[in-house]
Structures are given as C-alpha cells and as structure tokens.
Image (cartoon, rainbow, N blue to C red):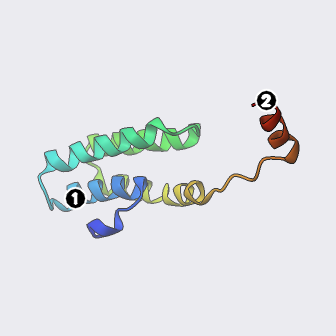
Amino acid sequence: MVPDQANTPVKRIYFAIMLMYLGESSETEAYEEFVQRMAEFFNVLLNKEIMERCLDIVRDVNTKNYYRALMRCKKLMPYEKERLEYVPGELPEDASDNQSTAS
C-alpha cells in the first residue's frame, strides 16, 4: 500500500501498522499516527464485535506483533466498505409531512 491508497479510516490504520512492520519510518511517528487513527475510528463505532477486533489490533501493536495486527486490520475492510457505501433510505412520506407541519 502506498500513502495515496490510505484513503479510508481503516486503510489509514493499516498503513500506520505497515510502516511499523516494515520499519519504513520512525516507529514513534507511525505509532502516534496509529493511535490517532484508531481513536478516531473507535469513537464512531457502535458494533461491539468490531470494537473487540479493534482492541485486539491495539494489543497486537502494543506487543509489536505487527503482522497479526495487519491481518486483523485487513479483516475490518469489508465492514468499513459496507458502512461507507451505506445510503439511508428516503424518509417515509408521512414523516416528511410531519416535518412540514411542525415548522
């Protein structure tokens, strides 16, 4: 993965872990990027299973098991793709009528 491909929250997390794994940049800088991106992602999660997976990734990174963290992070990508492609349906007609009468 190259920096331009790290264009979603999970891919940014993955990229930071990859930098630590490959030793491509300062481990401190990559770790700080990982922490920031993981915190941002974790703060918007509502799915308990995904939260637990994220905690597993954090544990792996903290024990320097970067390869396992990469594999776990990669498994989050389908979930993220599904959430990013989600388009809420239109409001039911009666709900929009209630909004216009409430104004």
- How far from the left and from the top, in percent, is residue 93? 86, 47
Secondary structure under the numbered disc 2 in the rendered image:
helix
Is residue 88 or residue 66 the one in the foreground? Answer: 88
Is 50 left or right of 95, judged from the image as shown?
left
Give the answer, above or below, for where 88 lies relative to 94: below
Secondary structure under the numbered disc 1 in the rendered image:
helix
- The circle drawn on residue 102 is 2
- The circle drawn on residue 83 is none
N-terminal of the pair, mark 2 or mark 1, is: 1
> In terms of image quadrants, where is residue 35?
top left
> In terms of image quadrants, where is residue 19?
bottom left
Residue at left offset 11%, top offset 52%:
26
**Amino acid at circle 2:** Ala
Q: Quadrant where the C terminus lies?
A: top right
Separation of marks 2 and 1 at Cα, in angstroms: 53 Å
Give the answer, above or below, for where 41 lies relative to 77: above
Is residue 98 or residue 88 the one in the foreground? Answer: 98
Q: Nearer the viewer, mark 2 or mark 1?
A: 2
**Amino acid at circle 1:** Leu
- The circle drawn on residue 19 is 1
Is 62 left or right of 9, judged from the image as shown?
left
Is 53 left or right of 57, judged from the image as shown?
right
- How far from the left and from the top, in percent, is residue 21? 23, 58
- Bin the neighbour count of mark 1 within 10 Å (Cα to Cα): few under 14, some 14-19, many 20 and up: some
Q: Quadrant where the N terminus lies?
A: bottom left
Spot the residue most to the top.
Answer: 102
- How far from the left and from the top, in percent, is residue 73? 42, 54
Residue at left offset 69%, top offset 52%:
88
Residue at left offset 34%, top offset 62%:
6
Give the answer, above or below, for where 71 lies relative to 65: below
